[in-house]
Amino acid sequence: MSDFIRRIRSDDEGQDIAEYAVMLAVILVIVVGTIRLIGANSNTVFSSVASAVAQ
């Protein structure tokens, strides 16, 4: 049994395509969320600057 556990711990095969897909999905969710957040805030900032300049 201890040989089996030792083999599992030392098994350093590469990551599967599924793990890369999960990482890509997490990164895309973070990027899209950040862009939406920045987009909403930047629209507010640009609107307030434009109204201040127009006065």
Image (cartoon, rainbow, N blue to C red):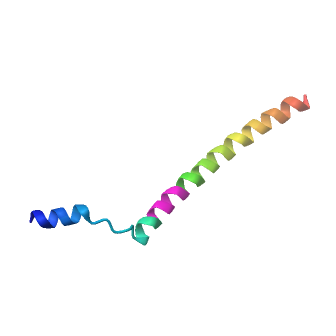
On the picture, is 9 further left or further right than 47? left
**Does 50 sit above or below residue 18?**
above
Picture coordinates of residue 10, whole percent (x, y): 25, 62
Between 14 and 39, the one lying in front of the other is: 14
Picture coordinates of residue 23, whole percent (x, y): 46, 60
Q: Residue at x 64, y 50 (%)?
A: 35
Query: Which corner quadrant holds the N terminus?
Result: bottom left
Q: Residue furthest right?
A: 54
Q: Residue furthest bottom?
A: 17
**Does 52 sit above or below residue 20?**
above
Between 10 and 28, the one lying in front of the other is: 10
Magenta stretch prevailing secondary structure: helix
On the picture, is 35 further left or further right than 23? right
Q: Residue at x 16, y 63 (%)?
A: 5
Question: What is the span of residues highlighted in magenta in the rendered image?
Answer: 22-28
On the picture, is 2 further left or further right than 27? left
Q: In the rendered image, which quarter is residue 46 located in?
A: top right
Q: Residue at x 34, y 69 (%)?
A: 13
Let me know if residue 25 is in the magenta part.
yes
**Does 25 sit above or below residue 17?**
above
Q: Residue at x 52, y 56 (%)?
A: 27
Picture coordinates of residue 16, whole percent (x, y): 39, 70
